[in-house]
Amino acid sequence: MVTTPLPGRARIGILGGPWTGKTTLARRITTELAGHGLRVERVGGLAKRAAAAGMPKMDTQTAHTTEWLMHQGLADETAALTAANVVLADGPVLGPLAYYTAALEHRGETPDELALDRLRLLASLAVPDYDLLIATVLDPQEATDSPHGDLRFQMQVHQHAHALLADLEAPHTIVENVDASQAAAVTRAVESALKAADR
């Protein structure tokens, strides 16, 4: 499902692997946008829903799981846009694809090129619908304490996410897990949301 932005609505995606400050950043953006009188809906938690449905996750993710995650994420974001001024997606459409290609590398598997091309097409069609894409940066020192799998896989997710952004030439803001960098990203998010409100 690919949509066009609704007038007066903003879609912001935060992309990155675990332990990169995504949740903290999303909270900061939500608080700041609410201070400007904007209603924010946060969308995410798809990995838990997929796991509850018995789908493979993390480094066992498959093309089927990835397609479900991407379509479901876009559907959730579109539904949220009907009631909110701003939708903040934790793990937007590019996230599942980055996890999938990282999982393939982690397992040493060759991808099904037809399936991969279909997933990349879906991602490329959806990218222009985001008013702002934010890509977080993994700090290996912090990641060593992460409960989300081994450091090697976390690094692969990080590398694949940033490579995907580059390959698709997707405009994005890179954010490190430090206060000054996050503060700058919050400012960008507010500017994007207010600009969308004037559409």
Image: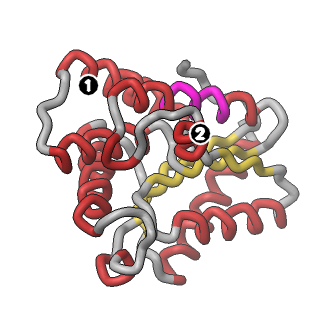
**Magenta stretch bounds:** 70-77
Distance, label 2 to label 1, CA atoms, is 24 Å
Circle 2 is placed at which residue position?
52
Find the residue positioned furthest to the right: 37
Report crowding for label 1: few under 14, some 14 to 19, many 20 or more residues within 10 A (C-alpha): some
x%, y% of residue 143?
A: 36, 75
SS assignment at label 2? helix
Of discs 2 and 1, which sits in the foreground? 2
Near-viewer residue (74 or 29) = 74
Amino acid type of the residue tagged 1 in the rendering: Leu
Q: Give the mark count.
A: 2
Report crowding for label 2: few under 14, some 14 to 19, many 20 or more residues within 10 A (C-alpha): few
SS assignment at label 1? helix
Q: Judge whether residue 62 can be spotted in this image.
A: yes
Amino acid type of the residue tagged 2 in the rendering: Ala
x%, y% of residue 70?
A: 48, 31
Q: Answer left or right for 19 relative to 97.
A: right
x%, y% of residue 106?
A: 19, 50
Circle 1 is placed at which residue position?
116
Q: Is residue 135 above or below residue 53?
A: below
Near-viewer residue (76 or 145) = 145
The residue depicted at 23 percent of the width and 64 percent of the height is 152
- Figure coloring: secondary structure
The residue depicted at 33 percent of the width and 32 percent of the height is 62
